[in-house]
Image (cartoon, rainbow, N blue to C red):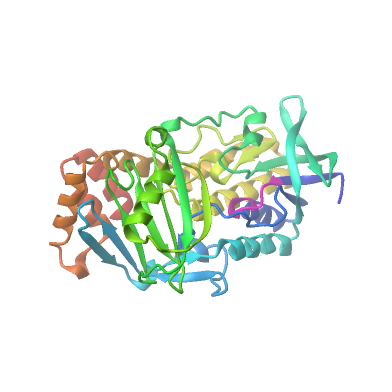
Amino acid sequence: MKNEYDIIVVGAGPAGSMAARFAAEQGVSVIMLEKDRDVGYPVRCGEAISRAGVEEFIEPDERWIKAHITKFCLVAPDETEVTLQFDARQEGYVLERRIFDYELAKTAAKAGAQILTRAYVNGLLFDGDKVCGVKYEHQGEQKELKAKIVIAADGVESRVGRWAGLKTHIDFRDMESCTQITAANIPVNDDTLYFYFGKDVAPEGYFWVFPKGDNTANIGLGVSGATGKKKSAKAFLDEFMAKHYPDAPILTYIAGGVPSSVTLDKISAPGIALVGDAARQVNPLSGGGIASGMIGGSIAGKIAAEAIKTNKPGHLLTYDKAWNKRLGKRHAVFNRIKEGIFNFSDEKFNKIARSINKIPYEKRTLGKVFTTALINQPSLLVDVAKVFVV
């Protein structure tokens, strides 16, 4: 290890690994610090992603693909089911994140990035107002490491961003309270993602069952922070399991918060950039953050390296605009759609499901689902057209 690097990336999740890789590919020196002993562990994710989201960054590999998804099944409160099938170009995957994250980190390593695990970042170094490195603990020793730029990929808590003076606060109502188990003996179709809606399963959110092959599945839900203060996500999960899969063996259990809001107002400052959950780059409608985090990481890594190679530190601040152009504006649209949908009554969800089932199976699309749901909200129909039609 050196005493100074061009770029330090804090956190080795998908966003961090892509930031490290895309920076290292341009020939600058990069080190990625991961607080846990293993990259990719613990897993806090539903693990679903589109094929396109994967292929932009890595060749799909059956070693970390647990299910190939070609259908959505939306389940209304009265148990009316709406099934949508999409063509091969829209195929999705349910991943094995432990392996997937490892492989992403290996692409960063192959590009030239160094990786250090069990490195717990507990502070920043400053040169005036500019971030110029990190303080961290490794093997019981307190150390310092200098850098021209620090990229924070340290998750939704993002202490690194907060230490740098960026406003990382999120309203508790926009922080989804999530919990998930992986369970065995779950008889679901391996090509289908199941989504449940309604006040009894996931008010102001949704409940999911994502297959992982061999009759195993990720089963969980996300509800708004306001709902979670009244009744825990775990209580909803326990009730669902008691009703649907009372004898299913539980293999893993996780819980945590998922930001369900627009991107932070500022995701860069002198010497620092935020990526992934730290920047609130999660899709606020679906809660999915793997693909968008990788996109954010790749943009930040590339721009950070350019700033160093051209000796123009201010270039890093163009990251905000570049992210907004690629996905930020789209996420703002998704957030408006989310706010228009998640307060629906159970009867509204039931009515939507019955209406969609009147559409011939081969003509059902997600765009038509949202159009039907928001038929009486013209302003939101424009948003639907922006993301599902254009």
Q: Is residue 135 magenta?
A: no
Q: Is residue 390 visible?
A: no
Q: Vertically, is 357 above or below 305?
A: below
Counting labels gives: 0
Name the image quarter holding residue 176. top left
Q: Is residue 159 visible?
A: yes
At 70% from the left edge and 35% from the top edge, which residue is drawn? Answer: 271
Q: Is residue 12 magenta?
A: yes
Q: Residue furthest front?
A: 247
Tell me where residue 20 appears, x and y as whole percent: 68, 53
Provide the residue span drawn in magenta.
Answer: 9-16
Please name whichever residue, 140 or 388, is drawn nearer the observer in this view of the structure.
140
Task: Give the left or right position of residue 374, taking residue 300 as reference.
Answer: left
At 23% from the left edge and 41% from the top edge, which residue is drawn? Answer: 344
In what quadrant of the picture does the C terminus appear?
A: bottom left
At 70% from the left edge and 39% from the top edge, which residue is drawn? Answer: 312
Tell me where residue 208 appears, x and y as whole percent: 38, 56
Task: Give the left or right position of residue 385, taking residue 91 as reference.
Answer: left
Name the image quarter holding residue 359. bottom left
Tell me where residue 157 appears, x and y as whole percent: 58, 37
Please name whichever residue, 191 or 11, is drawn nearer the observer in this view of the structure.
191
Please name whichever residue, 43 or 231, is drawn nearer the observer in this view of the structure.
231
Tell me where residue 34 appears, x and y as whole percent: 71, 49
